[in-house]
Image: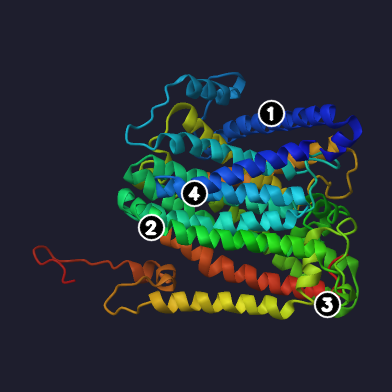
Amino acid sequence: MISIAAFWILSAVAVISALMVVSARNPVHSVLFLILTFFTTAGLFVLLGAEYLAMLLIVVYVGAVAVLFLFVVMMLDIDFVELKQGFMRYLPIGGLVALILFGMFIMVTSARIEAKIDPNMLASPTPDVSITSNAKAIGEILYTNYILFFQLAGLVLFVAMVGAIVLTLQHRQNVKRQSVTAQTARNRKTGVEIAKPKTGEGVSL
Amino acid sequence: MQGLVHDLGAFWGTLAGIGLSLLYLVAVLLTVAFILVFDRKVWAAVQMRKGPNVVGPFGLLQSFADFLKFVLKEIVIPSGANKTVFVIAPVITVLTSFMAWAVVPMAPGWGISNMNVGILYILAISSLGIYGIIMGGWASNSKYPFLGALRSAAQMVSYEVSIGFVIVTVLLLVGSLNLTDIVNHQKAGIWDWHAFSFIGAIVHGGSFAKVALGVVTGLIMFMMLWIFFISALAETNRPPFDLPEAESELVAGYQVEYSATLYLLFMMAEYVNIVFMCAMISIMFLGGWNLPWAEVTNPFIGCLVLYVKIWVIFFLFAMVKAIVPRYRYDQLMRIGWKIFLPTTLVAVAVVGAYVAFFGGNA
């Protein structure tokens, strides 16, 4: 009973906030609604018994990706009116993409129910959720059968990261930089110079 | 809580669960109230002052007086502020700080939720805490709060990384994401506490290679405790890492425009987070509710032991606040990314090797 109530509340909030993402006037509000959508989706995952996935969704998307979104959107000086003008123009394309995605969802879910179980899949079945936690189950399958894909995905992300750094890093000359080792290695002898100037002469620096 | 629903039926079980959560909430709030006085008292003692000493015996009730003062004052919302976000921000901060407590087991069998991804839940919730601060800073529609919010978000994101890796080392040793499992893994005695597991490696014996790598791992875990401690300081915006508020440069950072109850919520959330970090340190590294020489099975004694540990670690937090001067922002970033991140990465590799080759300390 509680889980049913939770499902309706969570899915209603998810759908409404997803609508608000595209219809909110202020882009910052849009991002905040996006975060709410992620959060409620994670709640739905918990209801499905996929708590590991739910936590990962929050850690990765809400904790890292959406923070960057929010950063960027907050820093930009956006003309809200101009932003809204393209809405009707892009509506057909956006609607088409949404429709295709929705069709794919339906195809995937119905395929899962109808398809006969592949004997190759049965050769290494994932353990039942009742005997293992799903963090363990995902780990066991991710680091054995899918190790190549897992590592390749990591590599792709790594390349992307290196690319971003290469694109933005500039070695500028004539910029004063701090040397932390030099700073911490300073002691009384190197840091202080005692000068005893004669009266009327001063010190040459 | 699932157990309650199972034992008492859906309605009474839910009601009992809500009651339990409220009890937990009140306990945490009372702890925060007294720990705040304790914090100020320690600070005062270091500076040879008396600290709060007017309200109640030894000033013990100072926090309650402050609470009343905050609640009775007027909430000022700047006219240029984004009102909804402005009000929601502190509420989110305080909510997430309390949500994290849901998985903390206070004693054997005592806790609201004993979920098997407890640690991940904590990571997830603590990453949500940033939003309150960013939203507060942005919604104030003023430069100082915005700068403070940006600083604070960058700081929290940076130190979450090293906190995550430190937690991974503990998880590797325990082999579970459940907080109760983590405590039970350290139940034998002080030599099995993760902070002192280099003693445990010698006590448990085995081949020379196992003992040697075990001692190295143990020493690394001892280091991890301090990295976690320092990262916790940064994560909760405690001095010496209180750059988000940096009253000398940014007035008070993201909370400049906040007054009365809304400010109270921010401050309360900060202290709830600090107490939470103290609890996490005791659970992950210092044996949780177990005594140094024996396992504790009585929940009342266990709760008391964990509580004492929380206060002892908070004393360290308070002393750091009193003694260490504030860091510069680039130094803070340097420590987080250039020192803690590589160190913890190497630590994960070494601990992982120990667990993979010798099966850990079990």
Q: Do labels 2 and 1 share a chain?
A: no
Q: Which amino acid type is marked by label 1?
A: Val
- Which residue shows up at 90% across the image and 67% down it? B204
* Mark 2 element type: helix
**Image coordinates for residue A56, horizontal then vertical, percent:** 67, 58
- Give SS at disc 3: helix
Amino acid at pointer 2: Arg
Q: In this view, does B75 lie to the left or right of B39?
A: left
- Residue under numbered circle 4: A21
**Separation of disc 1 and disc 4 at Cα?**
36 Å
Disc 3: which residue: B357
Chain letter behind tag 2: A
CA distance separating discs 1 and 3: 46 Å
Q: Looking at the image, is mark 3 or mark 4 nearer the viewer?
A: 4
Do labels 3 and 4 touch, CB within 8 Å? no
Q: Mark 2 points at which residue?
A: A89
Residue B225 location (% of width, % of height) = 67, 58
Q: Residue B26 carries which label?
A: 1
